[in-house]
Image (spheres, rainbow, N blue to C red):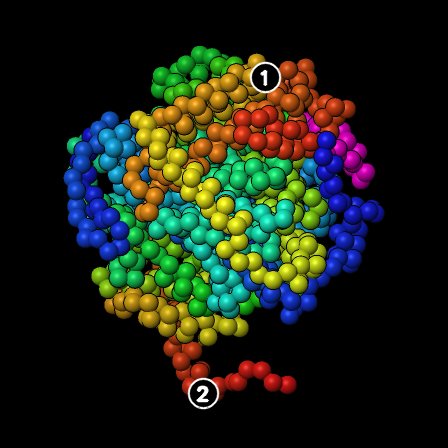
Amino acid sequence: MTNLNSKIPQGPVATKWSSYKDHIALVNPSNKRKLDIIVVGTGLAGASAAASLGALGFKVKAFCYQDSPRRAHSIAAQGGINASKNYQNDGDSVYRLFYDTIKGGDYRAREGNVYRLAEVSGNIIDQSVALGVPFAREYGGLLDNRSFGGAQVSRTFYARGQTGQQLLLGAYSALSRQVSLGNVESFTRHEMLELVLIDGRARGIIARNLVTGETERHSAHAVVLATGGYGNVFFLSTNAMGSNTTALWKAYKKGAFFANPCFTQIHPTCIPVHGEFQSKLTLMSESLRNDGRIWVPKRKEDVDALRKNKMKPKDIAEENRDYYLERRYPAFGNLVPRDVASRAAKERCDAGFGVGETGLAVYLDFAESIKRLGRNVIEERYGNLFQMYQKIVDENPYENPMMIYPAVHYTMGGLWVDYELMSTVSGLFVAGEANFSDHGANRLGASALMQGLADGYFVLPYTIQNYLADQINVPRFSTDLPEFAEAEKQVKANISKLFDIKGTKPVDYFHRQLGKIMWEYVGMARNKAGLEKAIQLIREVKAAFWKDVKITGENNEVNPELEKAGRVADFIELGELLAMDALNREESCGGHFREEYQTPEGEALRNDDEFMYVAAWEFQGEGKEPKLNKEPLEYEAIEVKQRNYK
Amino acid sequence: MDFTLKIWRQKNAKAKGKFVTYKVKGISDSSSFLEMLDVFNDQQVTKGEDPVVFDHDCREGICGACSLYINGRPHGPDDSVTTCQLHMRRFKDGDTIVIEPWRSAAFPVIRDLMIDRQAFDKIIQAGGFISVNTGGIPDANAILIPKQNADASMDAAACIGCGACVAACKNASAMLFVAAKVSHLALLPQGRAEASARVQAMVAKMDELGFGNCTNTGACEAECPKDISIENIARMNREFLGAKIGSQKKTVKAGGF
């Protein structure tokens, strides 16, 4: 087995990061200009990394598939960003944020990484405010906070229901400034289709210009992937339509290990599915759980009457409502972590108490808060979310409770990285949701924005220097090198292969099929037989795809069908790995719930003796079983316990 | 529901475009407008014909990628929504729907309904930022910002950069987009230091890129999916005028010890 060296610095957890920073090698300013860095993806992690590295003086090339870096899907994050500022004097601290994150992740994340994340969290707020992010404020002019699921303190900073948008626009403005200063070159409507290795190190990428269809070669001394998560493997998710795993998957095939792919997050508060042609799911921010109460009817006759439209939810008497989260988890109530809330909703719906046309929905009710605080306060806090709900569902959530149901939202798994955010490919760094590092088996609300910006603003600018310090005498790479020619040839061959299938069904047909299998067998609850069946079915989809997919048009033009085909081909393969990982992990932890492993009360039952490790999968060649490598997790600063939110 | 679609088809930036009429059938009234186009494209691909190309990504009204001109209005007949948030229940069964790209010299068509909005990125690069590098920043609460200023700044910062304001304007002016960014930063103490240089640089870039002038028709505000107010344009004009007067008084040379 490959020995995975996580490079966690020695010493107590609280001093690891400062001691690391004190001892790393640095690159002097005149040498930074001679070093090129490619950053793929311009969301929170990518934009903040590209801007920060550009500001340091490195020559950066930033790539995104969208028409502008500002459109990366971080923009859609609603609720907020955590930081252990303790502005509210409610007992928060770096240690407590660290502790909550490790516990929230069900003890499947690395202590060293998570402590660092909590440690730099405050700097992110400072940085963002300096860049002009208009966070919500109190009347006295100080920053406001709110609480979020899985925490007992108010440490979440927010900009209405558009926190991700404002943080991304902040990072995008910093990136734009570096473009104007000539430190960053921006390549929009470009998609990375291959990673180029020279002597075992990441030295460039092959990207397709999505307007002209040309394949381009780009070289660099190091490559950063900040391409987000792979939630679209489920077809329906809260991700953007273009969000994909292709960059990660190409890197995986070039030797980067894929860690914990089965750790996927199902978000509890999304708008329920409405029909066959639905293209995506819309999230309603978790912050709604601060003031909304979740319930379903207690009596089956009420469920029937509701479905037949014979009564309204407000006609159901208080004593006939089951506020099941408050009932099961009195200490955290409606603010339990996402995995717990999602499973509890599924449990009620499976037991026949779900509401809505499909029976796959629960109520999120604001009536009591509106009575207590007034409609104005609720409108100020959640106005844009209520409006969004009304537009999609055509019902007024101020008058009737919202209907919600869990949906795929975030992927904790990703490429394996060490403490320096470097993958198992030398010189290939991975940041943000694309790596596996900080959330363990479940991510707490308002932590994704924190991690993306921590990686980009405050971690990579240090760790990448430690790698580049001995590269200062390595001249810029010519893209005429045979390694580039070979990689480009491979990309072109793949494209031709897709066109040559000339089948009968559009790409989406296969993506939908894959999504159904993933949701059915690899979704909120998994079991051995189902996972084995899923692997079989995914292989059938793969065979069918390569025999029968139909792509119209040509390569040398704008061709969304071709783009989708390449992405779906990779999603199918990733789906199989995800199911294999879920099959291998014979325990329940965080978002990974194996029905065979639960407590008598139906809670996730971990198996720390056998599974307290990171599963890092190593590609062994097409058609071959990937190899499982294990990185054991050690807890020194935190006592490992059964998670308890009662 | 069934619809007749009149869609602008254009092979590439240089080709001549034209309207082509199609039928689409069996659309659910709870489908979004873009899901209706997905169904249409599925039909096209199955028939072996080119699907219609359009920009879209988040499909929840925040990324600013979607951009259609529907029955003569940017983002369609509803107020305060993007095209991806428009639902087919808004139309009547059997309706004819005309779908065009944004029309502006500064936003050339790439293909069909997809346009090139890089001009917006260039305007931001010209000055739509606060000049700070990463790190070495004082505590976030060291700057007090009155709530009403933070709220007004947020109102302006909510712009998604979709370009509907340009599409709606008979002069194809980008004033609302630029004014939103100028206001967002000018309303914050952190943004004041460079306010004067920022507004001048951004306005100059906007003019250079071929956007038209503002003649105060207010069409931009009416069509903005995020309800960005034209008060921002007034604020930008004040900032711009103030900057002009200030810059004539004295030029401070940079550098030197």
Look at the image and tell me whether residue B227 can be seen: no
Horizontal side of A643 relative to A518 (left or right) equals right
Going by the picture, which residue comes out furthest to the right? A11
Using the image as rendered, state which of residue A158 and residue B202 is in the foreground.
B202
Horizontal side of B28 relative to A177 (left or right) equals left
Q: x and y percent of residue A129 in the render? A: 57, 59
Q: Are marks 2 and 1 on the same chain?
A: no
Q: Is residue A422 above or below residue A392?
A: below
Q: Which residue is mark 2?
A: B249
Dividing the picture into quarters, in which one does residue A49 lie?
bottom right
Residue A632 colored in magenta in the image: yes
Using the image as rendered, state which of residue A141 and residue B158 is in the foreground.
B158
Q: Residue at x 64, y 39 (%)?
A: A416
C-beta proximity under 8 Å, tags 2 and 1:
no
Secondary structure under the numbered disc 2 in the rendered image: helix
User: Which image quarter is the N terminus of chain A in?
Assistant: top right
Horizontal side of A102 relative to A283 (left or right) equals right
Q: Is residue A121 above or below residue A567?
A: below
Dividing the picture into quarters, in which one does residue A473 lie?
bottom right
Q: Residue at x 65, y 24 (%)?
A: A585
Numbered mark located on residue A527 in the image = 1
Using the image as rendered, state which of residue A140 and residue B144 is in the foreground.
B144
Q: Residue at x 49, y 64 (%)?
A: A179
Going by the picture, which residue comes out furthest to the front? A482
Q: Amino acid at mark 2?
A: Lys
Look at the image and tell me whether residue A533 can be seen: yes
Using the image as rendered, state which of residue A459 and residue A338 is in the foreground.
A459
Span shown in magenta: A630-646
Q: Amino acid at mark 1?
A: Asn
